[in-house]
Amino acid sequence: MQKKIALITLDSQAVFFYALQIKELFGDIIKIDTYNIQDSSAFSIRKADLYVISTDAFESSEDINKYLPLDSDIVEIRVTFTKRSIRELLSLPKGTRAMFVNLSSKMAIESLTRLNQLGVNNIDFVPVYPGMVKIPELDFAVTPGEKRHVPSCVAQIMDIGPRVLDAATIVEIALKLNLEHLLEQSKFLDYFSSIADNSYSFYRLFGRSIRLESQFEILMDILDDGIIGVNEENIVFACSLKVEQILGVKRNFVLNKPANEVFPLIPFGECRRNLHIIKSRLIKIADTDISLSVTPVIRGGKYVGAFAAVKRFNDEEYNQHKLRRQLLNKGHKAKYTFNDITGNSPSIKKAREIAKKMAITNGSILITGESGSGKELFAHAIHNHSPRREYPFVAINCAAIPDNLLESELFGYEEGAFTGAKKGGKLGLFEFAHKGTLFLDEIEGMSANLQVKLLRVIQEKEVLRIGGNKIINVDVRIVAATNENLMDMVEKGSFRRDLYYRLNTLPVELPPLRERGDDIMLLFEHMKMSLDSKFILTEEAQNAFLQHKWSGNVRELRNYVEYLTYMDIPVVAYEDLPPALKGNPVMVIQDKMRHKDKAQIEVFMKTVGSDEEACYFILEQLYEATKNRKAIGRKFMAQEAERQGIFLTEQEIRRLLLHLDKFQFVKVSKGRGGSKITEKGIQLFEKIKEMVNKVEV
């Protein structure tokens, strides 16, 4: 019976090239339907026995579920170069400089990495791809079949031909279609001998023998699973080294013995009776959970043996996580380590050492500190220093996402759970972070309803998707962060006490930048270096940096470094600094006020702590908007702040507006209504403005 293969790639040229290779090897025993993303043919993929996909065809697992049927049997395309191509490249003189031209930056880097693995180290390659802004000035280019993208300025081009399917991909296709007997044919051996492979020489191995036992012995050593082979009498004739590692048995002990004696828990007998594949069965051997599959070998309708593939369940779970990261392509990986945390002050050193000790534990961590003090940086470093470093690091801002969307992001949902729900449902971030770390930033923004659900997940280690009825076990380490005093929120009843103590198992408090002394200029120089800035500060300008209150902390400092970099002034004097660095209008006027006015300003100061400059700016924006009879929102104010050189994000403006709203200085409206200054706020602002004008005069 003819087997059907659906071949899916990103572009049309690649899909036909790979289809031709597969068809030449397998012949008429298979039928190939080709699809690609560029011409939208992938939107209507017909049912097939096997789906062969390239990794660049899909951006996420949702895309795969959208294009392919559920529970599809999939082979991922892996490619390599021909030996002829490698010989051509190795013939070039050592030290040759050349462009390497490919379809994209990612494909060029992947190709160069593969060439390096195959021993091509004699050429100094520079990746070049369509859309590249700055083309290197080189007159020699190497390309894998992409001459159309070589810049016109290049005088000499070496086309080494397109990359071809590697041996592992061909073998996996044969195995999944139960066509492994074809691998004995000379055209497969010739193909394997023509391609470059730095792990195995398939030509040599297949040339040793064409008997089934020898062929299987060769294949099983390149698979991640432990492989056990039995003949028609269920006598063990093959046992891979992986089986010894997984099951703790010696090959010499089990070979040529009945399978029911040496592997009594593996259902070879059931497979022989029913002649059916046994898939994904979980058994326990020597206190280890083992995932196994047993596949019968049938020739001419007769049972001639079977193959069992065994794998530790934990190993399989780990590989699933690796695959999820590739398919979802959302960058759920911690980027920073403790080495990326710059600073020599005693306070930051202490915070760093405490965080290191806590990272190696499994308890929940609560990171507290002012906005911009580096909470997310510490969360990344904690994950990378923990035993969970090989698993996902998933970060989400609880205050930046509406409540209903945050619930679906965290817990996922089943198909049809609500209007607009994706077909097939959606994996929640708790499930995706399984075995890894979930970073909940601005945890204080989570609603009371979600606080209850989060508490249950932490306590019971299980989630229930929206619209679902199936309990899903998860093992996730929680790292939360806040710039609020959660204990005060607990006392006021806006944050659950039991959740607070669950999260605050291991507290880490980050010092504000103003308490880190010389770290200010150390960070300043580090940021200058990262931006390739050349300017220097006069002594007066440097003193302004050292005396500034840094309400925005490290993030605010970087904002000013970027500002001065873009100003392109070689020597920055005091008058060149952003307005916010030249003094605090509220603080300046305090000593020049009448007692009554001063008391009114002090009330204002107590409402916002160290953010009085930012609140003065917000009151000014709302005051001017009221005069002009218009409403403005956070986005507009953030843009105006950036224009004036003031460090304020939309999230920080939202937080300060809520503070001012509590004291009736402003009125925050939901939706598109914007925020407005109240009569009380107008009186306060006009008083401040009057005093500022007097001081300036």
Image: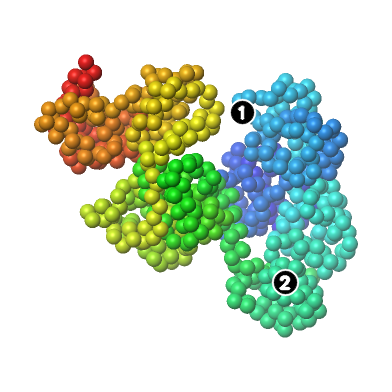
**Which residue type carries mark 2?**
Glu
Do tag 1 and tag 2 residues touch (Cβ < 8 Å)? no
Residue closest to the eye, 660 or 295 = 660
**Which residue is tagged 1?**
131
Residue 244 visible in image:
yes
Residue closest to the eye, 85 or 134 = 134
Asked which secondary structure carries label 2, the reply is helix
Measuring 40% from the left and 52% from the top, which residue is drawn there?
Answer: 508
Measuring 71% from the left and 40% from the top, which residue is drawn there?
Answer: 111
From what the image shows, is residue 38 above or below residue 27?
above
**Which residue type carries mark 1?**
Gly
Which is closer to the viewer, label 1 or label 2?
2
Q: Position of residue 97 (x, y in %)?
A: 76, 29
Report how far apart the C-alphas of labels 1 and 2 lie in the structure. Answer: 51 Å
Q: Position of residue 20 (x, y in %)?
A: 76, 45
How is the protein colored in the picture? Answer: rainbow
Of the residues under marks 1 and 2, which one precedes in the sequence? 1
Residue 536's disc is none
**Which residue is tagged 2?**
244
Outermost residue, bottom direction?
Answer: 261
Left or right of 687 on screen, residue 182: right
